[in-house]
Each structure stands twice: as C-alpha cells, then as structure tokens.
Amino acid sequence: MTAPDKRKGSRRQGRTLAFQVLFGLGFDPQVGESDVRLAFNRNPAVEECELEDAKGFASQLVQGVCENLPEIDKVIGKHSDHWKIGRIGKVELAILRLSLFEILHRSDIPLKVAINEAIELAKGFGDENSRAFVNGILDAVARAVDEGRFGIEKKMDRKADKKIDQTAGTAPDKKLGA
C-alpha cells in the first residue's frame, strides 16, 4: 500500500528537481548531453536531494526535454496564441517544456497527470497568472493529442471514451429511425 505513495512522492519531487534545473538552464543554456548532465549534477537542489529515485526521474526528464527542445518549443509556439517563446516567463516556460515532454514523449504518464503536476508547479513557483496560462496551453495540446493530431495513443478521459463508444453504437439507429 505504501509503495505507490512513495513512488508518487519521488516522482513529484523528481518533477520539481527537473523544473528547477530547466529553469536554471533558461538563464545558462547548455548544449550537448554531457553539458546538460553536468549542469544537472551541479544544481544545488539536485545536490541536496537524498532520494535517488527522484534524482533519476528528474535526470530522465531534463535529458528528454533538452533532446526534444526544438519540437517542444514549436508546440508551445503553436498553442500559445500571440505569445512568442521569448515573451513567456522563464518559470512558465520551464513548466511547459517539462509537461509537454511528459505529454508527447512519456507513454507512462497520462495526460491529466502531466497537466495536474504542471499546475502544482505553477502554483508553487509562479505568480497568480501562471496557473491559468500553463493550464490553457497544456489543455489545448492535450485536446490535440486526445484527438489524434500528434499520432500519440493517449486519451484525456477514459469515461468519456466509453460514452462516445456507446453513443457511436446507437447513433446510426437514430439516424435510420428519423
């Protein structure tokens, strides 16, 4: 019973570490896997963390974001109406990059989990507008993923899928009877 809670806790802590490293990289970008790894290991938050699971998860996230940064930034640009990457605050940008990596490249992380975790980061590190801004962009991307526009097999809500399937099964009968 306690194992899932511990894992959730280490993942949340890992996301927080990943956010902190990505935020720092926003001021001092690193090129290449070894430079990113070095920046990760030298980050004070990482040095202070005692949970190896959290550090391992954070490292995966940071490396993944850095490897996919051009694609992630393109998605942010496409879904952030009238906001260029350079105008987005560094806190919000780090959160968006982290969450979009989870949404687009981590099949083990459901859409809603990625969004909820991003909102928690925005509450903890952003200002009063961060949460709504981050949620708006991630919700738009999640809907696009849910609709199959990214070619990823993730859905927003399994209950809604069942309702759609049931409706789809009865819809032709209604049309024939009309």
Image (cartoon, rainbow, N blue to C red):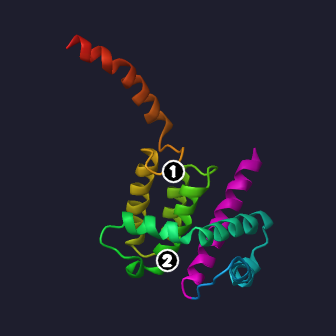
**Image point (54%, 56%), residue name:** 104
Of the numbered discs in the image, which one, if any, rests on residue 134? none
Above-or-below relation of 81 to 7: below
Q: In the current view of this chain or complex, which residue is farthest to the bottom? A: 28
Figure disc tally: 2
Coordinates of residue 64 in the picture (x, y in percent)? 64, 66
Give the left or right position of residue 160, taking residue 45 as reference.
Answer: left
What is the secondary structure assignment of the residue under circle 2? Answer: helix
Of the numbered discs in the image, which one, if any, rests on residue 91? 2
Residue 96 shows in this picture: no
Q: Is residue 24 magenta?
A: yes
Residue 26 shows in this picture: yes
Coordinates of residue 42 in the picture (x, y in percent)? 73, 85
Coordinates of residue 168 in the picture (x, y in percent)? 37, 24
Boundaries of the magenta span: 1-27
Front-lying residue, 9 or 27: 27
**Image point (55%, 71%), residue name:** 69
Q: Residues within 10 Å of mark 1 (few under 14, many from 20)?
A: some
SS majority, magenta: helix
Above-or-below relation of 108 to 93: above
Front-lying residue, 138 or 45: 138
Quarter assignment of residue 129: bottom left
Q: Which residue is mark 1?
A: 112
Quarter assignment of residue 147: top left
Three-letter code for the amino acid on which mark 2 is drawn: Val
Three-letter code for the amino acid on which mark 1 is drawn: Lys
What is the secondary structure assignment of the residue under circle 1? Answer: helix
